[in-house]
Amino acid sequence: MEMAQTKNTGDQLKFHELLSSFSVSITDAKKALYSDKILSSTDSQKLFSTFKTLLNPPSPPPTNNLSADTFASFFTDKVAAISKQFTQLATPEHSLLQTLSSPTISSPTASFSSFSPLTENCESKFLTYSLPTTCPLDPIPTKLLQAIAPTVAAAVTHVINASLTPGTFPTSLKHAQVKLLLKKNPSLPPNHVENYRPISLLPFLSKIIEMVAFKQITECLSQNCLLDPYQSGFKKGHSTETALLAVTESLKEVRATAKSSVLILLDSSAAFDTVSNGFLLSTLSTMGITEKVHVWFESYLTGRSFSVSWLGQSSTVHHLATGVPQGSVLGPLLFAIYTTSLGEIIRSHGFSYHCYADDTQLYLSFPSDDHNVSARISNCLSDISKWMKSHHLQLNRSKTELLAIPAKPSIQHNISIRNDFLSLAPSKAV
């Protein structure tokens, strides 16, 4: 029903008063919301994340004809296509012993055969101080679970020990719900499935069980010096910033000695998703992970599945035959274990390196009059390619870059790599 225009100055004044009151209410509500979010940020990382969310709110999902099943099939087919490119290994053990590009890991001084049972006090700490990430698969909000932690501590402790002691990971906690984020590139069209990044969400209880396993397995590997010291991915006291600082400082120190350097950035395609579970389990064995702990990891890795959530719809369930679980606590550690022997390949060619998860930066320093640099790089990359194929990993050629850093600005290095699997020319910036 249309309102009649009275043209009454009193009505006009009343209208402007209502608009002003509405504007004030909106401003006050925003202030209250912002204050609550900022004050609830318990650490600097969460505070900066809050600022980012408030200053750059996510745009609404684009309108297109994509469906949840379209995304799920795309992700499954992508991994299957990569896996088909590799020659099937006879057995993981045979590959470990026979593949020259995959040297064996030195035997640990002790084995880790069983998890230590968790006490209620320790479980309560894990439950209370974990980030309250709630997954749609969780039966109750995580914050509520943490609020009643003292009441449920005994039950949760029993569930955790019932998993770790016999070596069985609960089947109900092996399913992930995947949400999608458009990649941060304004030029990417939103109606293409390849322009979205999948984010796996796992039940909170599964992460608590993983945290307990992570703590004990990390202590074992650290005591035996089995973790790569040049892997910064998801390691306490390490970050992308510390990795970048380590690489840049090394390059600066070399340049101060009047030597040139070349930096090569390697990237893998769907690396976490194509990990061979058989090879990973074999690698764990060589590191001293045996008996019940090894059985638990086998249970943890097998029988996993995912479904995609998109615009209120959920795809059919897709089962995973390979890979370490993305979005998990143990996934990055298991990938670091899986790729430990890569460092030996790089060092055998006289290169230095630094890794962050599946991103690897290798660099070589040399006298400015060295004319064998291109050949050395080509030989190193050739062995890295062989190693990756034996481990069912695919080098992402489009994202592999090379940067030449001369000892002096006046020096020009003619470095280019052309072989059977890669063509690489220097970039001005990487």
Image (cartoon, grey):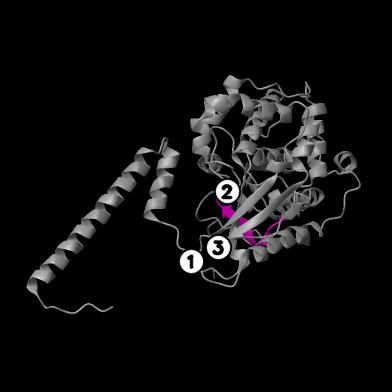
Which residue in the structure is indicated by mark 1? 186
Residue shown at the point (34%, 42%) measured from the top left = 36
Query: Where residue 178 sits in the image (x, y, percent)?
Result: 62, 54
Query: Where residue 266 sits in the image (x, y, percent)?
Result: 65, 52
Q: Quadrant of the C terminus?
A: bottom right
Which residue in the structure is indicated by mark 3? 311
Is residue 400 inside the magenta stretch? yes
Q: CA distance from mark 1 to mark 3?
A: 21 Å
Q: CB under 8 Å between callouts 2 and 1?
A: no
Q: Which mark is residue 41?
A: none
Residue 233 image-quadrant placement: top right
Q: Quadrant of the N terminus?
A: bottom left
Which residue in the structure is indicated by mark 2? 136
Residue shown at the point (43%, 46%) measured from the top left = 49
- Residue at the front extreme of this rendering: 1
Name the one closer to the observer, 240 or 138: 138
Type of the residue with mark 1: Pro
Name the one closer to the observer, 118 or 270: 118
Mark 1 element type: loop
Type of the residue with mark 2: Pro
Foreground mark, 1 or 3, reads 3
Instruction: Look at the image and give the residue range highlighted in magenta.
Output: 395-406
Instruction: Judge whether 183 appears above or below 168 on screen.
Output: below
